[in-house]
Image: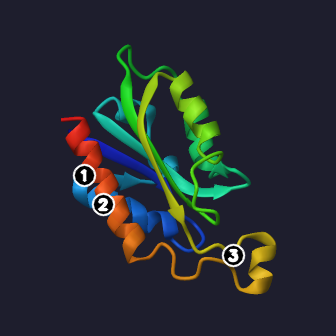
Amino acid sequence: MKTLIICKSIHHQNTQKIAKQIATVLKAEIKEPEKVGEEELKNYDLIGFGSGIYGWRHHKSLLKLADNLSNITKKTKKAFIFSTNGRGDKIPGHLVLKKKLEDKGFKIIDEFSCKGFDTFGPLKLIGGINKGKPDEQDLKEAKQFAKNLVSENS
């Protein structure tokens, strides 16, 4: 299963750490949204989309990529969504990206999210929250998530 992971990780590389764990299992390439062309996506069986969550949404560059995609294929393209955020949950943070991708013909087969070190906005005044996150347990869970993707889609 040829896999591409599209990831934007800017503040503390929280999401990049998760992307690397998933990529190791899936033997996937990781690229930033700005470096991905729509035509290139046709070459992959599975595409992961991930970033930190900012104001209840994925990073604007990931949302822009999703907006700019046409229906990339007549057959449904499989995808997964992942994120890190201060709360650690994927709902409602994944909803906007999920809807955009589904509208473009993607089938979202699974989602992953965990807490990340967060110093966004006023949190920087108190030194942030979730120091040390994602931790070893989170990285282990990301690897297990990827293993589940393989076993469920082989």
Q: Secondary structure at mark 1?
A: helix
Kind of residue sitting beneath label 1:
Lys
Kind of residue sitting beneath label 3:
Thr
Real-space Cα separation, disc 3 to disc 2, in angstroms: 25 Å
What residue sits right under mark 1 in the picture? 147
Q: Are marks 2 and 1 in contact (CB under 8 Å)?
A: yes
Q: Percent position (x, y) of residue 77?
A: 37, 27
Q: Percent position (x, y) of residue 8?
A: 52, 57
User: 152 or 102, which lies in front?
Assistant: 152
The N terminus sits in image quarter: top left
What residue sits right under mark 3 in the picture? 119
Q: Percent position (x, y) of residue 123?
A: 76, 76
What residue sits right under mark 2 in the picture? 143
**Mark 3, mark 2: which one is toward the viewer?**
2
> Residue 136 vs residue 64: left or right?
left
Quarter of the figure with residue 92? top right
What residue is rendered at 30% in x and 60% in y? 143
Q: Is residue 28 visible?
A: no
Q: Secondary structure at mark 2?
A: helix
Real-space Cα separation, disc 1 to disc 3, in angstroms: 31 Å
The C terminus sits in image quarter: top left
Q: Counting other residues with Cα less than 10 Å from the Cα at mark 2, is it few (<14), some (14-19), or many (20 or more)?
A: many
